[in-house]
Image: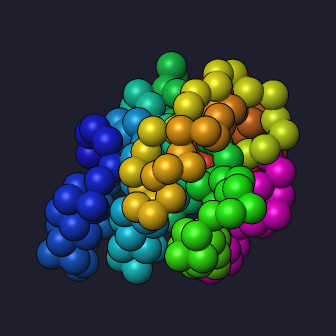
């Protein structure tokens, strides 16, 4: 599973998981992130499948780390892999005069995200704290088109990419089964 997460890559991945529902899957991943909703669709398909192991051989950033990684039954992190979290798209700050449709879209996304993490027994509030307040290893401007109506606000937001400790990630509910963690 290589490249950026898009609606197209999500549809293909969901179809492959459904076509192989009767067998265990090992998914080797190298994802830079991308469309948050598409990543949640992939994560939901992984959770429904129930027997997907994830191997992060090189990198799993952004939407990959936040929505695909916690959905796998088993996660193995290989040495020199890069795992980067950032703040949720739901944390975008809209101006006071933002159109009601944009506010509604952001609220809808935030509700879906909360349900997504609850299904995985991830402590949502703690995860949001990690995303927002752990010292960033890098900062970047958002140019994602993951929330269609909110594109206009994406470029004014900066997210800090963070790599929290393995202990902290496991405390919020991620299950790292084996291997290296980038802060090790």
Residue at the spot 70% in from the left edge and 56% down from the top edge: 95
Viewer-proximal residue, 133 or 183?
133
Nearest the eye: 67 or 109:
109
The image shows residue 104 at horizontal and vertical percentages of 59, 78
| Residue 37: percent from left, percent from top | 43, 65
- As displayed, is residue 178 above or below residue 181? below
Taking 73 as reference, is 32 left or right?
left
Res. 4 image quadrant? top left
Single out the residue that lies furthest toward the front: 97
Relative to 172, 97 lies left or right: left
Image side of residue 123 versus residue 87, left or right: right
Residue 115 inside the magenta-drawn segment: yes
Residue sitting at x 28%, y 38%: 3
- Magenta span contains residue 144: no
Residue in view at x 81 percent, y 28 percent: 135
Q: Is residue 94 visible?
A: yes
- Rendered location of residue 98, percent (x, y): 63, 64
Magenta segment, prevailing SS (helix, strand or loop): helix
Residue found at x 41% / y 27%: 58
Q: Position of residue 184 (x, y in %)?
A: 70, 23
Query: Where 106 sits versus 139, above or below?
Result: below
Q: Provide the residue span drawn in magenta.
A: 113-130
Name the quadrant containing residue 167. Answer: top right
């Amino acid at each position: 599973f290589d490249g950026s997460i898009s609606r197209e890559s999500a549809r293909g991945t969901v179809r492959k998981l459904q076509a192989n529902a009767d067998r265990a899957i090992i998914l080797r991943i190298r994802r830079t992130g991308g469309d948050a909703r598409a990543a949640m669709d992939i994560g939901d398909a992984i959770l429904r499948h129930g027997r997907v192991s994830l191997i992060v051989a090189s990198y799993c950033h952004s939407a990959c780390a936040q929505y695909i990684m916690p959905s796998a039954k088993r996660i193995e992190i290989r040495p020199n892999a890069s795992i980067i979290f950032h703040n949720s798209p739901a944390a975008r700050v809209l101006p006071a005069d933002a159109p009601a449709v944009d506010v509604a879209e952001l609220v809808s996304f935030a509700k879906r995200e909360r349900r997504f993490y609850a299904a995985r027994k991830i402590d949502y509030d703690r995860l949001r704290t990690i995303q927002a307040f752990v010292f960033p290893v890098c900062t970047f401007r958002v140019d994602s088109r993951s929330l269609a109506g909110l594109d206009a606000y994406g470029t004014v937001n900066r997210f800090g990419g963070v790599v929290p400790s393995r202990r902290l990630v496991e405390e919020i509910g991620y299950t790292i089964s084996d291997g290296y963690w980038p802060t090790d």
